[in-house]
Structures are given as C-alpha cells and as structure tokens.
Image (spheres, helix red, strand yellow):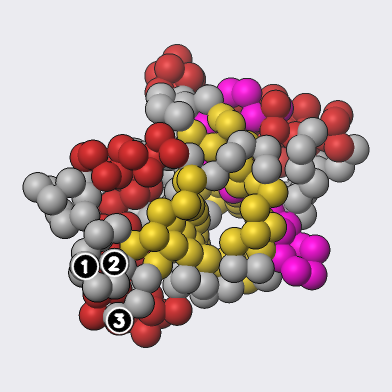
Amino acid sequence: MEIRILGAHNVESANTRLTSVLVDGVLAVDAGALTSSLTFPEQEKVSSILLTHCHYDHVRDVAAIALNYTYFRKAIKVYAQASTLEALLNNILNNVIYPNFTERPSERPSLKFYPLELYKVTDVDGYNVIALPEKHAVPAVGYQITSKEGRSFFYSGDTGPGLSSCWAHISPQLLIIDVTMPNGLEEHAIPAGHLTPRLLGEELAHFKKVKGYLPPVVIIHLATLFEKQIGEEAKQLAKELGTKITLGHEGMKLRV
C-alpha cells in the first residue's frame, strides 16, 4: 500500500498544501489538496474520498474535483459522518457558494455521498475502513485503513488529546497524526482540538501500553511558522520513546 501525502500543512502557499493524503492513487483521505496536487489524469483515477470532519482545509477540494468529474463523466464517492456530509451540502454545495453536485448534472450527478457509522468496518473500494470518534472543535473521526493484503495505517485528521480511546480498536503499521503546534502553545492547541509533540507523546505512550508496540509516526497538519520547532521537539520525543517520528511534507511517499 502506497500513501502519498498531498498536503501536510494547515495553511496553503506556493510551497505548502492543505491536508490530504492519497492511497494507491485511488482513495483520498481528506480533500485539502486534491485538485491543487494532482493532474487531471490522476484526479480521474480517484474513486473515493474519506472526510474526517467538515473544516474548510479538509473538504475544500470536494467541490473542485466534483466539477472536474462532470467533465470526466463519472461519479466520485464521498464517505464521512452524516453531520460532515450535511455541513458540506448546507454551506458549500448549496447552489449558492457552489452547485449541489449530488444532484448535478441531473442525468448523472458527479458526487455520491455515503454516511459512515462509527466503529463499523466498511468496505471502500476494497479497503476495510473503520471510523473512530476523536476530540476536535467539530464532530471528527480518524480512520484505520486496511488493504486486502492486511497492511494498515491510522490517519487521525485533526485531533486533540484523547486518541487513547481509539487504540483498542486498531492495530496499524503506521500512524499519521495531527501535530499543529509546538509545546509552548499547548494552552492554545487543546481548546482548538490539536496536538503538540508533548501531547502526542502521552498518546503514544498509551498506545504502547495497550498494544505492546509502537509503529512509525508521521506528523501532518503542521503550522508552517512553528515547523522547525515542532521538528526539534518531535526528534527529542522519538529518542525518548524509541520509535521513528517524521515530519510529513508535500509529495512524501510512504509504503506500508
């Protein structure tokens, strides 16, 4: 299973993209950088999108890729909690900000929405996907995604402290986790529903206690202004825990 990080940051610039990853070229997880990172042929290969929550930097390119799919003359499937799908329809795909592509084109809508149930394993394009609730400013989930070969990773999306409630339900070979701010901004990170390296360390220590191992960790949703500091703190944390912790970056490819 190949994972390509399209966007690893919480802000966009000439060098950074909003949060999104792509699995084997066909399954997107969050949609902050689908159209800005992929060519038209690459976009056309994407069959499904998993959304963790409704914040703009995670859903923006659902609308953009939906328009492109009208030209591709096919539909793309979007999976998320019902509340996330509802927020998309009410606030973006509302025929004011952008067309409702679950109804347009009328003869063949370019979006198909599928609400997900928490804790239930769902087949999405041959991958086993389980959505687990997380603590954030809006309803949010993380996903464990498992290939037909049994290879799996866990993607947190945006999350604050409390990931330990997920660990009993998953056994991934890789963790892709939100760490937005450095330790010195913990008082701001917690109410916003994000992690710092120190808070991540607490979650990983609990993971090891529950599961008996620690997989490699890739950090995303980085605040660019603090990226160097986050990297230094993550490096120290990796030494303390005896595991590999890497900062994600745009174009990064991972194999599980």
Asked if residue 213 shows in the view, the reply is: yes
**Residues under numbered marks 3 and 1 in contact, where contact means CB atoms less than 8 Å apart:** no
Instruction: Provide residue 199's location: percent of width, then percent of height.
Output: 61, 25
**Residue at figure coordinates x 53%, y 25% from the top left:** 135
Residue linked to disc 2 = 109
**Secondary structure type for disc 2:** loop
Instruction: Give the magenta part as a residue range.
Output: 146-164
Instruction: Provide residue 45's location: percent of width, then percent of height.
Output: 45, 79
Which of disc 1 and disc 3 is earlier in sequence? Answer: 3
Q: Is residue 91 left or right of residue 119?
A: left
Residue linked to disc 1 = 106
**Secondary structure type for disc 3:** helix
Label 3 and label 1: CA atoms lie apart by 15 Å
Q: Is residue 233 left or right of residue 65?
A: right
**Residues under numbered marks 2 and 3 in contact, where contact means CB atoms less than 8 Å apart:** no
Residue type for callout 3: Phe
Residue type for callout 2: Pro
Residue 72 badge: 3
Residue 61 against residue 239 in the figure, above or below: below
- How many neighbours does mark 3 have within 10 angstroms: few (below 14), some (14-19), or many (20 or more)? some
Instruction: Provide residue 22's location: percent of width, then percent of height.
Output: 51, 65
Q: Is residue 86 left or right of residue 232?
A: left
- How many neighbours does mark 2 have within 10 angstroms: few (below 14), some (14-19), or many (20 or more)? some
**Residue at figure coordinates x 52%, y 74% from the top left:** 25
Q: How many marks?
A: 3
Label 2 and label 3: CA atoms lie apart by 11 Å
Instruction: Provide residue 124's location: percent of width, then percent of height.
Output: 59, 61
Residue type for callout 1: Ser
**Residues under numbered marks 2 and 1 in contact, where contact means CB atoms less than 8 Å apart:** yes
